[in-house]
Each structure stands twice: as C-alpha cells, then as structure tokens.
Image (cartoon, helix red, strand yellow):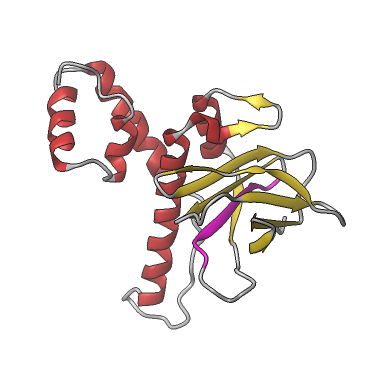
Amino acid sequence: MSEHVGENAELYPLGLLEPGDVRALEAHVADCAECSARVARASAVAFSLTAPLPAVEPRLKSPSRSPARTTQLVAWLAAAALLVVAIGLARQNLALRSGAADRATIVATLVHSHFKHVEMAAPSGQKLAAKVLYARDGSWIFVIVDGAPGSLHLFGRATAAFRDLGALQTAAGTASLLVRTDRPLRQVELRAAGATLGTATLLY
C-alpha cells in the first residue's frame, strides 16, 4: 500500500474491513509510523467507548455468565461500534445547532463525556433498532438507527411542545443525528412521513 490508510484506520479496530484490506493495512502500518499511530488512536477510541457500559448484576450467584448478560453486553458493544462508524462515515452527520464542528472535536466530546443511553421503543410494539445517547447535563443528544426505514426526523421536547431537531443522515443503512440542545430534553420521538416510529424518555 503506497498511500496512507485513510479512514480504514477507524474501521480496522471494529473488524469492518475486508480481508484484503486488512492485510494491506497491516503491511502498510508496519513501515509507516504516521498510520500506525492513527490506527492506535482509533483502537483507543473504540476501546474507550465501552467504558460507560452499565454493570449488570446477575440474579443468581454463579461463576458462569448468563446468556442474557452476554447478549446485553454484545448489544452495547455493537452500539458503541456503530457510534464510532457513524462518526467516521459522514462529517455532516455531526452538524451541531451551533454549526459544523471538527470531527476530532466531536469524537473527543463523545469519548470523554459522561453520557447515558436508552433504547427507543416502537409504539406499535414492533422491534426498532434505535438508541439515544445523551449528555448527563443535557447539552447534547445523539440518535442512531440501524436499518433506517427511509427519511427520518428527530423531534424532542423539554416541556410541553415537541420541536423538530433535524433530519437524520443515512449512510450504508444506518441513520444518525447529533445535536446540541439548549436545555435537557425529557422526551424524543423518531418520525417518518408524519408517523411516530419510536419514542424514548430521557432521565437525568
């Protein structure tokens, strides 16, 4: 590989590269200190995103991990990986209300912030692969949807009235939106063509 690894540095620690790309990247970083350092930083970011995962106390004292706990851990690790991918896929996905911000600044904000997360529930009872991550101080909110069904808009409210927070940007079937909020939101809704697809209540 004669050129630098580019965005593959962020995809490599997530296991999202094709085998040929993996071999090419590993051969390149063996001789390129710049790209080796970039891959190391990307790996650290991916690892750091698992730090806020909630501890799950087993109901029964047992040395073995229950299937439910394993499934939940895998789900949260997948959510963290999707977050990193969404950040790297499209810079415009991370447009804040105060204006577009540098991607590195956004990554640092998410990694070093203390944030909470909640799954969105579909009113119809159908399964919805959508999560909401939000700052504990209510200063920002990030929504990510896997298998996005068309054009989506995020609505939120701090008091009585909902307001449109913006359209989610879609890349490779994953839709996401990160917005800065002027006050903590209490509830958010995911809508498409006027219909509510999912809701979530945010607790601080």
Front-most of residues 124 and 195:
195
Highlighted range, magenta:
128-137
Asked whether residue 79 is in view, the answer is yes
Q: Is residue 153 left or right of residue 8?
A: right
Residue 3: image quadrant is top left
Provide residue 171's location: percent of width, then percent of height. 44, 42
Provide residue 110's location: percent of width, then percent of height. 55, 38
Q: At x 36% / y 80%, what residue is drawn?
A: 62
Q: At x 87% / y 57%, what residue is drawn?
A: 160
In this view, the residue farthest toward the right is 160
In this view, the residue farthest toward the front is 193
Q: Is residue 166 left or right of residue 51?
A: right
Instruction: Say which quadrant the C terminus sits in.
Output: bottom right
| Residue 32 versus residue 53 in the image, above or below | above
| Residue 198 versus residue 105 in the image, above or below | below
Q: At x 30% / y 23%, what residue is drawn?
A: 37
Q: How many marks?
A: 0
Q: Main secondary structure of the magenta part?
A: strand
Instruction: Say which quadrant the N terminus sits in.
Output: top left
Q: At x 53% / y 58%, what residue is drawn?
A: 130
Q: Is residue 199 left or right of residue 168?
A: right
Residue 180: image quadrant is top right
Front-most of residues 83 and 95:
95
| Residue 2 versus residue 11 in the image, above or below | above
Residue 9 colored in magenta in the image = no
Provide residue 98's location: percent of width, then percent of height. 71, 27
| Residue 21 versus residue 199 in the image, above or below | above
Provide residue 16's location: percent of width, then percent of height. 28, 44
Front-most of residues 92 and 193:
193
In this view, the residue farthest toward the bottom is 60
Q: Is residue 131 left or right of residue 44?
A: right
